[in-house]
Image: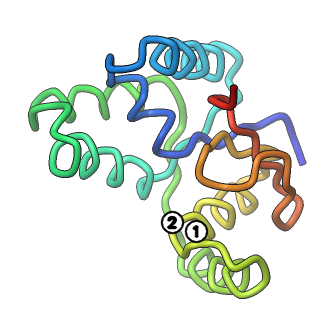
Amino acid sequence: MSGKRFLDTNVLIYSCDSSDVSEQQTALDLIAECSSQGTGLLSVEVLGEFFHATVVRKKLLATDEAERAILAFRAAMPVVSVELQDVADAIAIHRRYQTRYWDSLIIATAARHGCGEVLSEDLNDGQSYNGVLVSNPFRP
């Protein structure tokens, strides 16, 4: 696997959430680093989850603000589509590791695009899933 890093939804959410300044700064630094080094990758699934979480679930942003943030994320790094094979691979990952389906889909999509690492707090920090290492950038 390469030095490419797949950013999970929580990284994007924290970049817009000022309730924890430390988490927000970590997220902003990660996005800037992945963008400037050309190592970051996002998926349409992650952008959709970001919109739902920030506008509907957490009410952190207005619709227009979330849309502007998504446009900024798209400008900062490539965004890939989720393919039918990713769904099948996600089901296999779910079966093997007992992960939630949406987390499994992120791992499957990251693997298909050659990412060596997923940045997320939702999976086991330091665990490799089908050759993709998960790192929790928000761990204490």
| Residue type of the residue flagged with mark 1 | Leu
Which residue corresponds to the image point at 55% horizontal and 45% vertical from the top-left?
Answer: 8
Specify the quadrant that holds the C terminus: top right
- Asked if labels 1 and 2 touch by Cβ distance under 8 angstroms, the answer is yes
Q: Amino acid at mark 2?
A: Val
From the top left corner, tell me how far across and down residue 65 is, in percent.
16, 27
Horizontal placement of 79 versus 36: left or right? left
**62 relative position to 124: left or right:** left
Mark 2 sits on what residue? 82
Tell me: residue 77, above or below residue 85.
above
Residue 31 x, y percent position in the rendering: 55, 22
Residue that label 1 marks? 105
- Dot 2 lies on which element? loop
Picture coordinates of residue 10, whole percent (x, y): 47, 41
Counting every numbered tag in the picture gives 2
Q: Secondary structure at mark 1?
A: helix
Image position of 125 (left or right of 120)? right
Nearer to us of marks 2 and 1 is: 1
Q: Residue furthest front?
A: 140
Mark 2 nearby-residue class (10 Å; few <14, some 14–19, many ≥20)? some
Q: Is residue 29 above or below residue 55?
A: above
> 38 or 13, which lies in front?
13
